[in-house]
């Protein structure tokens, strides 16, 4: 199964990296849909898009979403479930008991700092080198609704305060 996924990564990731590099609002929208499983508000997309345009790395934004209180609460505020779900969101595979135990112990050693843990997990997975945007490949992301309606990066880059939606 991992071999099939590896082939898929090689084929699909370059296209996604290019598309999201051109439009960070799509990347932000997809973070909300794929990680938090909800529609973002216009202001949420604008905030994170501005952060990315100001130099925040995509993995920092992704780690912020995965380490967020909202994601943690969705996982029942249970460290072990949080670790398992985070690993699944990053690797697309069921983690082993040993992996879950290892990362749960690491979360304890980090005194519950979920953001730091997610950054370590992102850095530790060899399948996710480079842009690490694989999590956005989902059916709902590839639909016609994968772009926030009316939001244009040009408006955010120019500092346009008009309502782009």
Image (tube, rainbow, N blue to C red):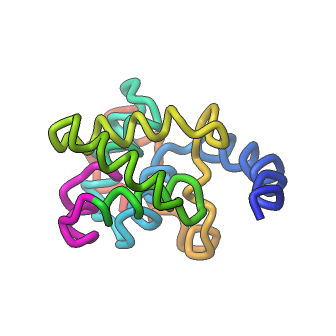
Residue pictured at 38% horizontal, 53% vertical: 101
Boundaries of the magenta span: 66-79
Residue pictured at 35% horizontal, 72% vertical: 38
Q: How many marks?
A: 0
Return the residue nearer the eye: 121 or 57: 121
Residue pictured at 55% horizontal, 56% vertical: 135
**Residue 86, image x and y in percent?**
41, 56
Is residue 90 part of the magenta span, yes or no? Answer: no
**Residue 164, image x and y in percent?**
36, 55
> Horizontal placement of 123 versus 131: left or right?
left
Is residue 77 part of the magenta span, yes or no? Answer: yes
**Residue 136, image x and y in percent?**
56, 58
Q: Is residue 54 above or below residue 47?
A: above
Q: Is residue 125 above or below residue 12?
A: above
Q: Is residue 144 above or below residue 47?
A: below
Return the residue nearer the eye: 46 or 39: 39
Q: Quadrant of residue 53?
A: top left
Return the residue nearer the eye: 152 or 35: 35
Q: Quadrant of residue 56?
A: top left
> Horizontal placement of 27 versus 15: left or right?
left
**The N terminus sits in image quarter:** bottom right
Residue pictured at 41% horizontal, 63% vertical: 85
**Residue 26, image x and y in percent?**
51, 53
């Amino acid at each position: 199964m991992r071999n099939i996924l590896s082939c898929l990564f090689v084929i699909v990731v370059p296209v996604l990296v290019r598309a999201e590099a051109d439009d960070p609002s799509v990347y932000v929208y997809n973070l909300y849909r794929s990680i938090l499983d909800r529609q973002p508000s216009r202001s949420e997309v604008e905030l994170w898009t501005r952060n990315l345009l100001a130099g925040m790395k995509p993995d920092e934004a992704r780690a912020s979403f995965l380490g967020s209180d909202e994601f943690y609460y969705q996982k029942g505020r249970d460290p072990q479930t949080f670790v398992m779900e985070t690993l699944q969101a990053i690797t697309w595979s069921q983690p082993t008991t040993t992996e879950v135990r290892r990362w749960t112990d690491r979360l304890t050693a980090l005194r519950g700092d979920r953001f730091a843990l997610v950054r370590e997990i992102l850095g530790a997975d060899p399948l996710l080198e480079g842009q690490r945007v694989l999590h956005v490949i989902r059916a709902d992301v590839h639909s016609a609704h994968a772009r926030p309606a009316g939001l244009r990066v040009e408006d955010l880059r120019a500092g346009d305060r008009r309502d782009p939606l």
